[in-house]
Amino acid sequence: MKKLLFLGIVAVFASSVQAQNTYLYNQDFESYPAFSPPNNWTNTIPGMGVYTGRGFNASKGLDRNYNANSRRDSITSPFMGVVAPNTKLSFMYRVVDYIGNIGVKHFLDPGDEIVVYIVDSLSTTQIYRITTANHVDTSAFKEVVVDLTNFEGRTVKVRFSVTRGTSSLFDFNANFDNVAMYIPQVTTSIGELKEVTGLALSPNPATTETSLRFHLEKGGELVFRLTDMHGRVMQTLPKTYFGTGDNRIDFNIEGIPAGVYFVQLVGASGQKTLRMLVGN
């Protein structure tokens, strides 16, 4: 197995940027004051607010404590933009215990639910519902991606509605972060890098270093890139020859802000991409 060690962030010019997605709206709540409602979202009383440590990787995020049966609260975003063909909505959510302790209580009881709506001038439409049936019992954030094809041409908002059911046994906190509406990169003109198989990152999520492992059916030259969600190149390795068989690229991500990134291998016949989460 060939192992290539690659450490450090390499500066590149903006002209080398290749966007992953086109973002119509992208909100991580870091710009809002802590312990307050986001000032351009509309919430019910008492409603949700922005709190430190309630977002992805202990950043700021939307939080609401549900400590009474039959309580229902909702929060609605500002207008995010006009839905274009192939537009997606994505967000991250988790459930933690009554006072926000991570790992203590992260399940939903019967009757508890989180409902996601798309709101426009015509209607309020449910697009996703989280209950005991599909909620993952973990204190980690889960990313949800919903296709918005049915709303093409409309200017929309997103609404999160959370209910503590009458039969609920435990209080809980609902947390939301990284709310985005985007158009995925069109890749039909870029072929798949078929000579590369077994593409994997370990660890993922990562905090300081990680490794990209892959197998080459036939040796050849490849370019390695690490980009953020806006397509900005954070690290790059110029065209390098890799031999037939198992290969590995170790790279240092220390100092890169927490969030979602993309790792790419690009060759003459196309490219392959993996999503990577960087933690604190």
Image (cartoon, helix red, strand yellow):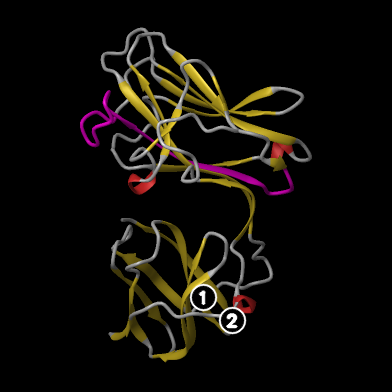
Quarter of the image with the N terminus in it: bottom left
Task: Say which amino acid is labelled 2.
Answer: Ser
Horizontal side, residue 158 vs residue 252: left or right: right
Residue 269 circle label: 2
Magenta span? 83-106
Q: Position of residue 164 (x, y in %)?
A: 38, 15
Of residues 239 and 252, which is closer to you in this image? 252
Q: Is 135 placed left or right of 105 in the picture?
A: right
Residue 142: x %, y % from top left: 40, 42
Q: Residues within 10 Å of mark 1 (few under 14, many from 20)?
A: few
Main SS class of the magenta portion in the image: loop
Front tag of 1 and 2: 2
Identify the image quadrant of residue 255: bottom left
Residue 12: x and y, percent? 53, 80
User: At label 1, which amino acid type do we have?
Assistant: Lys
Q: Residue at x 37, y 42 (%)?
A: 141
Residue 211 relative to residue 237: left or right? left
The magenta stretch spans residue 90 = yes
Residue 21, percent from left and from top? 61, 58
- The residue where tag 1 is placed is 194
Q: Are marks 1 and 2 in contact (CB under 8 Å)?
A: yes
